[in-house]
Amino acid sequence: MTFRGGNGGPTQDLTQESAGLPIEVEALRLRALPVVVGDTSDVPPRQFAVMAHFSPLEEKPSRTATVEEIYPRLMEAGSTLRTGIALLGEAAQRADAAVAAIGDDDLVAADIELQHLQAVLPELFCCRSLGDGFGSVVNSLQIAFANQKGLPFNSEQVGAIARAVRRLRHEPFLSIDQAVDIVAALEDVDVVVEPPGLGELADLGNEQSLS
Amino acid sequence: MSKAFLDTTILTDVLLKPGPSACAAKAAMARFTTTELPVCAIKEFKAGPLANFVWFHNKLVQTSYEDALVALQALSRTPRRYMTSTAIEALRFCAYSTHQDKLRELRLKYGEKAEMGSVIRDQYRLTLKTAVLKAWRRRRSVTSEVVEPLACYKEVEPKQVKDLLDVKPTKCFPERECCLAVRMRAGIDQLQKLKEATDTQDPNSERIRRSRALGEFIRVPKRLVTENMCRDLGDAIFAFLAPPDATILTTNLKDHGPLAEAVGKRAENP
């Protein structure tokens, strides 16, 4: 497990550092969040340390922690993360409502929910300092909506969008590789996540050799 | 049983050109029972199309959106400038995906992060970064088989160096000579036909290099085949390596058509 400190601080490998620590810390090592990466420059260093209360190993978790519980200290400290999580909460609600509306065969209601989700994306993109993984997913969604030119997404696509938003909400610091997985899943259901004409860049080399 | 042997243009269409190009390429591949991708197509893909994406990504990391556009427009002064214009259109599309009024409002809260130039730059930069990593990851799943491995070429994943992407190595590193040299020596007659076909085409820099490389090898087959020589063979290597029962799938029929025909093989557009 790796935590990257704020302000480009040193990366700590907790897995190695926690060897031989008391049981509580050992529990933290096993139960703490996965990789935290990205630009957390507005989060004071060392505030990552206390993020939640972790019960001893032998206790079985009774429920799933909410995103707000998982990131309480970071939420206090980082306005970008706080805004990002709040906006993602709104986006996730909209996405879930769209999925539910499609289940009810109410395509208009589904599209209205997605319109609201789309409206959140420009502000979410302003939170891209959370990391390129975060930025990449939000960006892909923005372009996907623009590519639709107002046409509604189909049910599979809405499902994929909802999964993407939920995943991002649970892992706002996801890596670019994890983001690529999410974007690929969108493409798998024919959501177009790249702007038209982008591919022509691929042929620039040919131009140079021809010239 | 039908077999397609893909060249770099088809791989590029599938991986980097979503929309009509990718659809046409996939539809063409679906006509065949098996589809084969030679590793030399992966090598060319990385050194060419993928490197172009990386070039512009890095330009956007290091300069402003406006400066990156100027760099892109500088390439417009070439015979295929309409393509660059299309790429510039893609940048404009990014701009329109975010409404200016909304950004004006967000600028009060987010400052520079909501400036139009910064937003477009990051939209395009992230699109390119995602596209590069996604394309590399998918390269070996485009076809049913990946064939003709190159012992002297290592498929090294593009990596991040600070905020930049790095595609190197893009070349082979032969210990003594190109790993295809032995097969080339055994197929001199085919190489001769490929040279004749190349010489009948209108000369351009690529064809001139190919003809020269083929000519040098045919004259002195014992000479060591260098990485440069192998690279200069270009499209001829696809016609040389394609199985006799395979159809070379390419969008560059102008080059591949005569080469394939010269050695009794077929090339087809999607």
Image (cartoon, coloured by chain):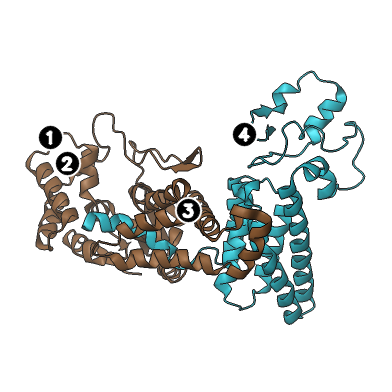
Name the residue rendered at 74%, 58% in the picture: A88
Observer-side mark, 4 or 3, equals 4
Find residue B161 and report its horizontal and vertical position in percent: 48, 37
Quick one: which chain is cyan?
A
- Quarter of the view holding residue A209: bottom left
Instruction: Identify the residue position indicated by label 2 in the image.
Output: B185
Name the residue rendered at 75%, 31% in the picture: A46
Which comes sooner in the sequence, label 3 or label 2? Answer: 3
Instruction: Identify the residue position indicated by label 1 in the image.
Output: B222
Display colour for chain B: brown
CB contact under 8 Å: marks 3 and 2: no
Amino acid type of the residue tagged 2 in the rendering: Arg
CB contact under 8 Å: marks 4 and 3: no
Marked residue chain, label 4? A
Instruction: Identify the residue position indicated by label 4 in the image.
Output: A8
Amino acid type of the residue tagged 1 in the rendering: Lys
Q: CA distance from mark 3 to mark 2?
A: 34 Å
Q: Residue furthest top?
A: A20
Q: Are marks 4 and 1 on the same chain?
A: no
Could you tell me which quadrant the N terminus of chain A lies in? top right
Q: Residue furthest front?
A: B108
Q: Which mark is residue B135?
A: 3
